[in-house]
Image (cartoon, rainbow, N blue to C red):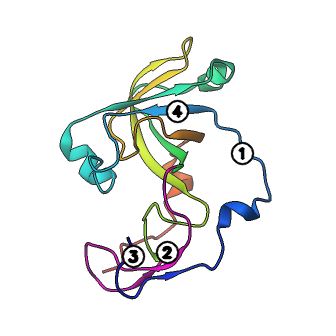
Amino acid sequence: MRRAGEIALPFDPATRSAAGITFIGRIRSPWAKGTAPKNLRAARETGQGARVELDPAYAPALTGLEVGQAIQLLYWVDRGERDLLVQNPAHGRGLRGTFALRSPVRPNPIALGTVVITTLDIASGVIGIDATDAWDGTPVLDIKPWLDTVDVPPGWRPVD
């Protein structure tokens, strides 16, 4: 349902695909439409963990990861809308462009969550994670280690 002032694209971005994507696994979580937390912070507050189940072919790629390590999980919000350019978030602050929000409604529904590995079974390709806001069955695109020397810009300070 559109909120006041929202602007949508005149086309479906999915029809303009220019690259192939391979899903490497799925997120398993307790969440579904209407029950998911609004973001990763809220998901952590529930105390509900989740897991990533990789396609067995990708399991060896987990070598070198460790329990307690932070990783960046890129996932495909496959059941989200894709056509909004300007959104009117329910949490307020007025109209905002899609690229100024962490909303799952985007032309390419790629989500990024920095999570902590709670369990790791490389042989089966299963990673336990501390939390997710993704719905159960959400496809996983990639996993990258979070590195403070790379992922935090030098001299970075939060914007007030």
Q: Residue furthest front?
A: 1
Judge left or right: residue 52 versus residue 123.
left
Which residue does the numbered mark 3 point to in the structure image? 2
- Label 4, label 2: how far apart the Cα atoms are: 25 Å
Task: State the image quarter where residue 139 is shown.
Answer: top right
Looking at the rendered image, the disc whose residue lies closer to the viewer, 3 or 2, is 3
Tag 2 near tag 1, CB within 8 Å:
no
**Quarter of the picture holding the N terminus:** bottom left
| Of pointers 4 and 3, the one earlier in the residue sequence | 3
Which residue does the numbered mark 2 point to in the structure image? 98
Q: Residue shown at 51%/51% (left/top)?
A: 77
In the image, what residue type sits under mark 2?
A: Thr
Which residue does the numbered mark 4 point to in the structure image? 26
- Label 4, label 3: how far apart the Cα atoms are: 29 Å
Looking at the rendered image, the disc whose residue lies closer to the viewer, 4 or 3, is 3
Query: What stretch of residues is rendered in magenta?
Result: 79-98
Tag 3 near tag 1, CB within 8 Å:
no
In the image, what residue type sits under mark 4?
A: Arg
**Position of 18 relative to 8 (above/below):** above
**Position of 42 relative to 27 (above/below):** below
Looking at the rendered image, the disc whose residue lies closer to the viewer, 3 or 1, is 3
Q: How many marks do you count on the picture?
A: 4
Main SS of the magenta part reads loop
Q: Residue furthest right?
A: 18
